[in-house]
Image (spheres, rainbow, N blue to C red):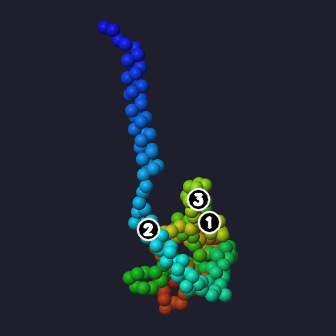
Amino acid sequence: MYYNNNSKKKSKKKFLLIPLAIFIVLVLLIIFIPRNPNNDTKQAKQTEALQEQASSQIGMPNITNFYEKNMMKTIMEDCDNSNLITYSYIKNDMTGKFTYLGESMGYGLPYGTEYTNPKYSNDNGITLPQADPNGLYKAQNVHATWIMLIDPSTKQAKPVYIESDVTVSPFKLPKNLLDTSTLPADY
């Protein structure tokens, strides 16, 4: 049987040209067909217009003391004090009383806090989390906490992992708020 080599080449070219042509048509459709903005985009534009209108009518608050920012600075500086002795408690939801855990150093660290940026960073204008001034990336919606509890026998601070909500105070809470059975004799 006689095969024409040219017909094989022509059928191969046709076979390769068809997917290429389909690809080109799809790219052109994606580029040139106008898209209608979805509802979220419309609402975002409307909200932005309303915010601009409100800002021009009302203006910004007349903040002069910057008390909250100063308070945050004080809190962050206290958290950075390596000699700060605190007192840690968890609350018993059944009795409403606090259980005394002991003396601690600092205010504790949320378990999910990251030492390095946990997100991928790129140069395409995507907003990424920014570290706090202490260089850490605070976790969102994490209830577990590391507390540096002071061992009463050695007086050395050691990390203790706590999954309950914890209350850490720079002063001892009043005894009437506490489950007295958890208190040491020298409380």
* Residue 120 vs residue 171, the one in the foreground: 120
| Residue 170 location (% of width, % of height) | 61, 83
Name the mark on residue 11.
none
For discs 3 and 2, the disc positioned in front in the rendered view: 2
The residue tagged 3 is 125
Image marks 3 and 2: residues in contact by CB distance under 8 Å: no
- Residues under labels 3 and 2: Cα distance? 22 Å
Crowdedness near tag 3: few (<14), some (14–19) or many (≥20) residues, C-alpha within 10 Å:
few
Q: Tag 2 or tag 1, which sits nearer the N-term?
A: 2
| Secondary structure under the numbered disc 1 in the rendered image | loop
The residue tagged 2 is 42
Kind of residue at disc 2: Lys
| Residue 107 location (% of width, % of height) | 59, 76
Which image quadrant for residue 60? bottom right
Please say if 5 is above or below 39. Answer: above
Q: Is residue 108 left or right of residue 29?
A: right
| Residue 37 location (% of width, % of height) | 43, 62
Look at the image and tell me whether residue 177 can be seen.
yes
Image marks 1 and 2: residues in contact by CB distance under 8 Å: no
**Residue at coordinates 62% horizontally, 66% vertically from top-left?**
131
* Quarter of the figure that contains the C terminus: bottom right
